[in-house]
Amino acid sequence: MHLSLQYTGFLNEECDDTIIELSKLSIADQSHEVTVLDTFHDTSSRLATPRDYVLRRCGQADAILFDECYPDTVLKNCHKIGEGVYGEVFLWRARDGRARVLKIVPIAGTLKVNGESQKDFHEIISEIVIAMELSALRAPIAEINRHFDEGKDVEALNLHAIENATDVFNEVLAVKCVYGSYPARLLDLWDLYDECKGSENDNPAILPADQQFIVLELANAGQDLESYQFNNAEQAYALFLQVAYGLAVAEEAFQFEHRDLHWGNVLIAPTDQKYATFVLRGRALRVARCGVAGTVIDYSLSRVSLPLAAGECAALYNDLAADDSLFDAVGDYQFEVYRLMRDKLGNDWKNFEPYTNILWLHYTVDKMITSLRYKRTNTKIHKHYIDKLKGIKSRILDYGSAALFVLTDNEI
Ligand SMILES: Nc1ncnc2c1ncn2[C@@H]1O[C@H](COP(=O)(O)OP(=O)(O)OP(=O)(O)O)[C@@H](O)[C@H]1O
Ligand SMILES: [Mg+2]
């Protein structure tokens, strides 16, 4: 795989030239319109199975025992914060003092979990790869911020040919492949959550002793947009721009479409940092944070293009064409957006159509005007920014991509 010299992402690992061979579900060679994916049994490939590929991505030779990887003694400061059909989410403050989120997904087993078949290794590759690549876009940001903090201006900044950078996507701290019984401590925490909040999931204690799991260790990115209480619409506006610039950067870097950016997938943490920094088309830009740091999560429906040898690209995506239930739901604009995306893409989910990001930004700005929680609404500043959000809502559908919106809209 050939990458630009400046690129510091996870793709530099030598195993990545095999990615095209490994996913049945969702990788397609765009230039040849072929879904490449029956070749992973090819004995000539260096990595024999999707499981091997995932292990390489995890930096592991083999799966490790779950309760040796996460022994009860290290899981002291841990509690369950959420769940989904895919599995469980815990918040954990590790010994290094850093809060992180563990997303634990049972994988490749025959037992139905939470009413659904478990994903196989080839079906989780795309989420792992997209999460790692987007996370790696943050690599130059700390250095650029140092430059600005020293009072230097943007003209004096040598970006060393970095074209795209953002820290708006969830930071991946580690991905682990483990197997064996669920650690006793996590089972206790699962019970506690069930008693306090009620769980809709199966108790993980039912899983067999040889169950395999993928554990995504993610930086804690705070609370979701639906539940966050903003001071006023100025903060919501600042968040909106962070998300819009982040999407623009990822469109440019990877032909990225999120495809599921509802208000549970935008997280917010309070921050003292004055600005969010982005590099877009080789130019460093700063956006006021106004006390909120936004993070985009959950790439299970997302789409990217990854560079291959000889200047070709592979599209990594989730083929939603056969997923009728996603398009049937009614009641919230969110569900309308799935249908609008399908129309725009002609139900061909391989293609890059950044207008889907615009649709989700339109949904987001609509939520900001109609449904978010604000502490102070009776102020001039709040009304001023609600008007600005209304202006965006009326204009944004005229742009073809998040990049075009942030680069050419004169009023943001
Ligand atoms: N980095 C994070 N920081 C804080 N909370 C998180 C983080 N990642 C996930 N969460 C919490 O866990 C919930 C579920 O995570 P996520 O959105 O990735 O999966 P999902 O939407 O439930 O499932 P799927 O991956 O199948 O779409 C989130 O809505 C959020 O509340
Ligand atoms: Mg989600």
Image (spheres, rainbow, N blue to C red):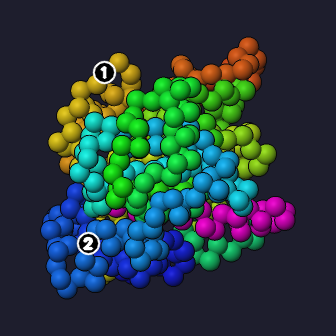
- Image quadrant in which the C terminus is located: top right
Q: CA distance from mark 2 to mark 1?
A: 40 Å
- Residue shown at 16% from the left, 79% from the top: 42
| Vertical comparison of 14 with 408: above or below | below
- The residue where tag 1 is placed is 330
Please state which of residues 33 and 66 is positioned toward the viewer in this rendering: 66
Circle on res. 204: none
Q: Specify the amino acid type for callout 2.
A: Thr
Ligand 1 is within 8 Å of the C-beta of the residue at disc 1: no
Mark linked to residue 49: 2
Q: Secondary structure at mark 1?
A: loop
State which region is magenta.
125-153
Q: Amino acid at mark 1?
A: Val
* Residue 138 part of the magenta-drawn span: yes
Is 239 on the left-hand or right-hand side of 132?
Answer: right
Q: Residue at x 56, y 54 (%)?
A: 218
